[in-house]
Image (spheres, rainbow, N blue to C red):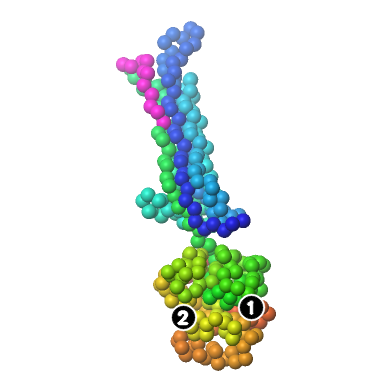
């Protein structure tokens, strides 16, 4: 299934049913009077969050979503049936914006959380409502109101505890394969990862990792895949910044760190200031890892933890996962969990 993280749709709520125009006609009951019932309200359009979807691909071609209208009022003071609501499933983490007002209508972050994006039209009134002592045969009714119509943008921001970032070929996909059951494509060329992947690390404190395509210098100006996928780590609590420290890396470690930090700051300063751990990868291909660590700490004045791993062999990943679980557990109160 294609990964689509943005979609534009039009939602139209149901029209309210018209009020009925009717007079009671029964044998032996002359001048029975008006008995036209009210119409039914139109159905609403309601978005709800589900964990069974992880993409907005369903709305790539389905551009218009319409709830059903209310039924008209009937004879014998019978009210028309209310129109059925249209329930629209969207992935967890979907932000809903009104295209006309630029207003954010809601952020669906919990399973079964609902958001009414278009209200159904109110029902019309039947002629029985207009009977008075001076007007015993009213021919007056009202029509049901039109339902709301809105043009919306749906934007998916993946929900995850840990975000993986780094230059292309830093080993992010290999790491998520080693530590979770996720199976992203792995190949020895840049931009193997074309869209985000999620993986779940099991244990005493399960957590979700989001792997996004590699960031390169100039991403802010649209180079490579640009900043498009950085939104998917904007909700994460912790960032793992993978750095290839092997001799085959395109950039020296210090330069690679600078590039990613700069691009993060260009996208969102608060994201650049988030808790970020350096994860030095491909240590199995290096002779003097300690010297590299010293150089990095001295050059960047980093107080956050630095981990040295080999994503391919799994060396060092257990410590990284254990420390992450402890950090997440320790900070749960801060996030209200």
Which numbered tag is attached to residue 173? none
Kindly state the secondary structure of the residue where label 1 is placed: loop
| Residue 28 visible in the current orientation | yes
Q: Is residue 136 magenta?
A: yes
Tag of residue 311: 1
Check disc 1: other Cα within 10 Å, few if <14, some if 14-19, many if 20+: many
Q: Label 2 to label 1, Cα distance in Å?
A: 22 Å
Among numbered discs 2 and 1, the one appearing first in the sequence = 2
Q: Is residue 18 left or right of residue 319?
A: left
Of marks 2 and 1, the one in the foreground: 2
Q: Residue furthest top?
A: 28
**Disc ID at residue 258:** 2
Q: Residue extending furthest left?
A: 134
Q: Are marks 2 and 1 in contact (CB under 8 Å)?
A: no
Q: Position of residue 136 (x, y in %)?
A: 36, 15
State whether the magenta stretch is mostly helix, strand or loop: loop
* Image quarter of the N terminus: bottom right
Residue 175 in sight in this render: no
| Residue positioned 62% across, 82% down in the render | 282
> Where 244 falls versus 18 (above or below)?
below
Residue at 57%, 72% (x, y): give it.
190
Quarter of the view holding residue 150: top left
Provide the residue span drawn in magenta: 134-144
Q: Position of residue 313 (x, y in %)?
A: 68, 80
**Nearer to us in this view, 283 or 255:** 255
């Amino acid at each position: 299934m294609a990964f689509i993280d943005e979609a534009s749709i039009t939602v139209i709520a149901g029209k309210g049913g018209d009020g009925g125009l009717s007079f009671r006609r029964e044998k032996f009951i002359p001048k029975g009077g008006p008995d036209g019932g009210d119409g039914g309200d139109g159905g609403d359009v309601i978005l709800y969050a589900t964990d069974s979807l992880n993409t907005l691909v369903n709305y790539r071609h389905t551009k218009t979503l319409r709830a059903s209208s209310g039924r008209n009022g009937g004879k014998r003071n019978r009210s028309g049936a209310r129109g059925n609501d249209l329930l629209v499933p969207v992935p967890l983490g979907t932000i809903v914006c009104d295209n006309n007002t630029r207003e954010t209508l809601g952020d669906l972050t919990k399973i079964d959380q609902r958001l009414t994006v278009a209200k159904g039209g109110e029902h019309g009134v039947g002629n029985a409502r207009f009977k008075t002592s001076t007007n015993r045969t009213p021919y007056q009714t009202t029509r049901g109101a039109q339902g709301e119509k809105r043009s919306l943008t749906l934007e998916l921001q993946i929900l995850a505890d840990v975000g993986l970032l780094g230059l292309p070929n830093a080993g992010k996909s290999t790491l998520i394969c080693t530590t979770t059951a996720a199976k992203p494509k792995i190949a020895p060329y840049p931009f193997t990862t074309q869209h985000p992947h999620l993986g779940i690390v099991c244990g005493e404190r399960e957590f979700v990792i989001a792997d996004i395509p590699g960031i390169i210098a100039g991403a802010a100006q649209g180079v490579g895949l640009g900043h498009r996928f950085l939104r998917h780590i904007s909700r994460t609590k912790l960032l793992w910044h993978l750095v290839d420290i092997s001799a085959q890396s395109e950039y020296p470690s210090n330069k690679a760190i600078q590039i990613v930090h700069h691009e993060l700051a260009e996208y969102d300063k608060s994201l650049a200031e988030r808790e970020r751990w350096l994860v030095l990868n491909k240590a199995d291909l290096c002779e003097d890892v300690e010297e590299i660590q010293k150089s990095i700490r001295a050059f960047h004045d980093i107080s956050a933890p630095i981990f040295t791993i080999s994503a391919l062999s799994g060396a060092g990943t257990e410590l990284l996962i254990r420390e992450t679980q402890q950090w997440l557990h320790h900070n749960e109160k801060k996030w209200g969990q």
